[in-house]
Amino acid sequence: MDLKDLYREVILDHNKSPRLYGKLEPADSSADGHNPLCGDRLHISVRLDGDRVSDLRFEGKGCAISVASASMMCEAVKGKRRDDIAHLFHEIHTVLTQHDAPVPEDLGKLAALSGVREFPVRVKCASLCWHTLNAALERSAATVKTE
Amino acid sequence: MSAHPKTHGLYDAQKVWRDFPILAREVHGRPLVFLDSAASSQRPRSVIEAVDAYERQHHANVHRGVYQLSQEATAMFEHARERVRGFVNAASTREVIFTRGTTEAINLVAQSWGRNQLKRGDEILLTALEHHANIVPWQLVAEQTGAVVKVVPMDRRGVVSIDDVAASLTDRTRIVACAHVSNALGTVLPVREITRLAHARGALVLLDGAQAVPHQAVDLAELGCDFYAFSAHKMYGPTGIGVLVGREALLEAMPPWQGGGDMILTVSFEKTTYNELPFKFEAGTPHISGAVGLAAAIDYIESLGLDNIHAHEQRLLADATRALLRVPGLEIIGTAPDKAAVISFTLEGIHPHDLGTILDAEGVAVRTGHHCAMPVMEFFNVPATARASFACYSRDSDIDALTGALARAREVFF
């Protein structure tokens, strides 16, 4: 168990200086995520241009993994089409949950999260933002849980 | 409590530590440093062996068979009840009811006493530092009866003052339900004074003793409360068994809570007559091996002496508090003058869950999260804390391991 696998430089950097942090007002859609186990709360607001996420922001409190994951996710999906985001979500979910899954090359920075799978109790920290973004995209106003 | 009691020289923590086989194991290639006894303590060899011997030699159902094994199991089960009675100085074994744990004991009182006695507008008085187990059962019964839950505030140290309790009591207060010791903050509450005040206003008192019984001698005759609840697994015994001690007259008047075997005298499809105390509240086959383990845990605690354990833990608390306050950016949440050996803390710039993971990699087990006390977290405006809690087997070197692991966390993050 190597902590450096979990807390890679890029993760610590995004935790310390989160990108796209804040709230879009007005937004076309938004959603709240909550991990009741650790108390993490996340709000994601998005602006849409056709089927493209033209802009988005996140705000909330959480551990380094959840903050960094949200920050990197926002950077990665900004400007992308829904289909591409769904594809990324599928890839990141596979990387987070399947021990031996290869890390796809097109994940870019997000590949840094692959170390989380060695720490099963922390997987939800990394996936909360993706579930929340999904909810925002489905225009669901309901609070999402990672359960 | 003096920071350096005289018993220090007599108490051999290393010897006590060796009584607990699990403490010798490694975690992630590091020696285990177990600092989460407030969540669940470990078991000494004597408890493990008592349960093992029961399972191998004596098991049968209790209160049923005329054969030898059933008589042995019944005798061991009832012996455990007597050991519990003596441990907390209850008036009689009729007042000692085995439950699944503290949570079930509180639910039993809320449903059997509360649901039948509480009327619309009656008040249930809690304190601001309660565990969810002493909040939710009262909210449920309040919903069922129209009673109201009220909360005595605490101050920034995590202290609940007698004056605030007095000011919160009214003629509508029917029961005061409060922790003896706070699991999240370590605060020891002035429960004898609270009981006196509540009784003066005609209210009953239930004390959640889960965090108290492993750390200090509890004398129910002296406390004078009406109900006292605790769990075996926080006092070196098995999980799945706990105790409700209740005043006999109150228990007599309360209807059964759950129905089944063991709690009846006669059953026909028209009418059932209930068994006498304490069996009226023990429907179904009980956790017999758990009771045997609990009795062995009491034997173990008494062999060390609760006063010695208390003095040892208080010295560790003082030393650990000093050591932690030297860690840059560390803030202790819960600074009551009278505390059990529980230290909740936050470290600036590192979320408690990251701390928990890094400490675990160093072999140090601490609890991180809301400690089933979300109102407490909200009061202190933190999403979660890390919590180190000490027990009879904790050693000075555990404090060094904790501060070393915290230094490692700062290296990873800064």
Image (cartoon, rainbow, N blue to C red):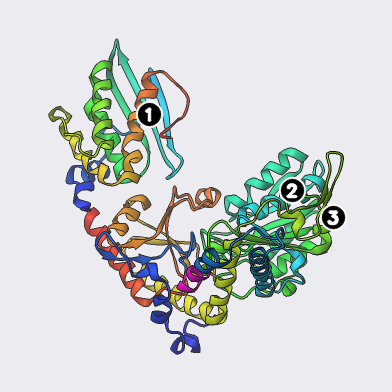
Q: Is residue B315 above or below residue B257?
A: below
* Circle nearer the viewer, 2 or 1: 2
The reply to the same-chain question for discs 3 and 2 is yes
Residue at 44% over, 20% down: A140
Which chain is mark 1 on? A
Bin the neighbour count of mark 3 within 10 Å (Cα to Cα): few under 14, some 14-19, many 20 and up: few
Q: Are marks 2 and 1 in contact (CB under 8 Å)?
A: no
Circle 3: element type = helix
B257 left or right of B359 in image: right
Q: Which residue is mark 3?
A: B253
Residue A34 figure quarter: top left
- Is residue B49 inside the magenta stretch? yes
Q: Is residue B361 visible?
A: yes
Q: Amino acid at mark 2?
A: Trp
Q: Mark number for residue A132?
A: 1
The residue positioned farthest toward the top in the image shown: A50
Principal SS element in the magenta part?
helix
| Disc 3/disc 2 C-alpha distance (Å) | 12 Å
Q: Is residue B159 visible?
A: no
Find the magenta span and give its range.
B44-50
* Circle nearer the viewer, 1 or 3: 3
Q: Position of residue A48 (x, y in %)?
A: 31, 15
Circle 2: element type = loop
Which chain is mark 3 on? B
Q: Position of residue B362 (x, y in %)?
A: 27, 61
The residue positioned farthest toward the front in the image shown: B67
Q: Amino acid at mark 3?
A: Ala
Q: Which residue is mark 2?
A: B257
Residue B252 figure quarter: bottom right
Q: Amino acid at mark 1?
A: Thr
Q: Position of residue B260 (x, y in %)?
A: 72, 47
